[in-house]
Amino acid sequence: MSPDLPLRIAGEEVSTGDWIEVRSPWSAERIGRVAKAGPAEIERAIAAAAAGFEETRSLPAHRRAEVLRKLRDRIEDRRAEFVETIIGEAGKPRRFAEAEVERGLTTVRLASEEATRFEGEVVPVDIEPRGEGAFCAVRRFPVGPITAITPFNFPLNLALHKVAPALAAGNPVILKPSPRTPITADLLARAVESSGWPKRAFSLVHADPDVARPLWTDERIRFVSFTGSDAVGWKIKEEANRKKVTLELGGNAAAIVCEDADVEDAAGRLATAAFAYGGQVCSSRRCWRRRSSSSRQTRPILPRSSAP
C-alpha cells in the first residue's frame, strides 16, 4: 500500500485532512489515499499557474526541450514503478501497462522534438502594390494556463498527451486525474517537478467536480483539455466561458477489412482493439467489409466477439 499522498501545488506538498481512497480493481483492497482539494487549494493552483505563465512563456526552445528530455529520463528511471502502479490502481494487465509506459516515453520524446521546431505559415503580403518589400510570417505563442482532466483507462499516457505538448509550447498545467488512478498521476507530477520545469507552472489536484469547477470556468484558465465521457465533456465545454476547449470523448472508430486481408490476423487485431482491457480502449468499435466479400471474412471474427 502506498503512503498517504498530498496534493502537489506549485512544487509544494499540500495536505488537507480530507482524503480520496484508492482501491484495487483486482481485490477491492485499499492501496492508498490522496488528499482531496477544497476551494482554497483549487484557487491556489490557479493563482500559481497564472503567475507562472510569465516565466514559462519566455522560456527558450532549448530549455523547454531540455525539460522534456529530463522528464522522459525520470519516467524511464521509474519505469517499473509506473508499470506496477498502473497494474495496481487501474487493473490493467501487465503487458498493457508496460505498453502504456513505453508509449508514454514516446509521447514525451516527440514533444521534446516539437519544442525545438519553429514552424509557421508565410503569408504573401505582396499580392498588392502596398505590400511590396514586406514579409509576413505566422507564429504560434503559448496560450496560458491549461487544465488537463484525464481518465482512468490510460492514466499515464493520456496525461502525457496533455502535459508534454503543453510544456513544449511553454504553458503552465494543472493536472486533475481520475480519482480512480491518482497514484500514477502523483508519480508523473514528481517527475515533472524534478525535470527543471518552473515550480509555479505545474500542479496536481484531486477534487470533487463541484469543487473543481473553477478549473474550467475561471478566466485565468485559458485552455481546457478533457478526456472522458460525452456527458461530462460537453458539460465542461458549456461551462467554460467560451475559452478554448478540446474534448476526447467516446470513440466510434471503424476498422476496414479489405478483401485481400489475412482474416485470421485481422480477427485477432480487431478483438484486441475492441475488447482488450475490458473494452476500455475506444477503438475499432465497428468493422466494415465490402458487401461483395464472402462470409470467410466475418467467420473468424464472430467467435471472438460473442459472449461465452
Image (cartoon, helix red, strand yellow):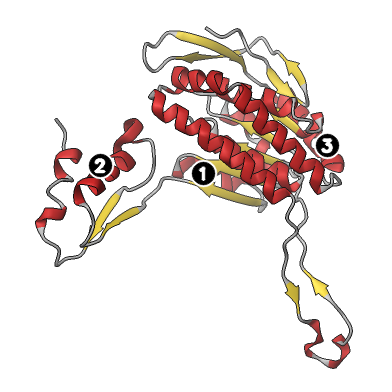
Mark number displayed over residue 52: 3
Q: Position of residue 59 (x, y in %)?
A: 84, 44
Distance between mark 1 and mark 3 Cα atoms: 27 Å
Instruction: Find residue 24 and report its image quarter.
Output: top left
**Neighbour class for label 1 at 10 Å: few (<14), some, many (≥20)?**
many
Measure the alpha-carbon separation of dots 3 and 2.
48 Å
Which of marks 2 and 3 precedes in the sequence? Answer: 3
Q: Amino acid at mark 2?
A: Gly
Asked if residue 261 lies left or right of residue 96, the reply is left
Q: Position of residue 31 (x, y in %)?
A: 49, 10
Residue 235 pos. (x, y %):
53, 44
Q: Is residue 80 above or below residue 72?
A: above
Q: Which residue is mark 1?
A: 233
Kind of residue at badge 1: Gly
Position of 226 relative to 278 (above/below): below
Label 1 secondary element: helix
In the rendered structure, find residue 268 and report the number of the disc placed on it. 2
Is the Cβ of the residue at disc 1 closer than 8 Å to that at disc 3?
A: no
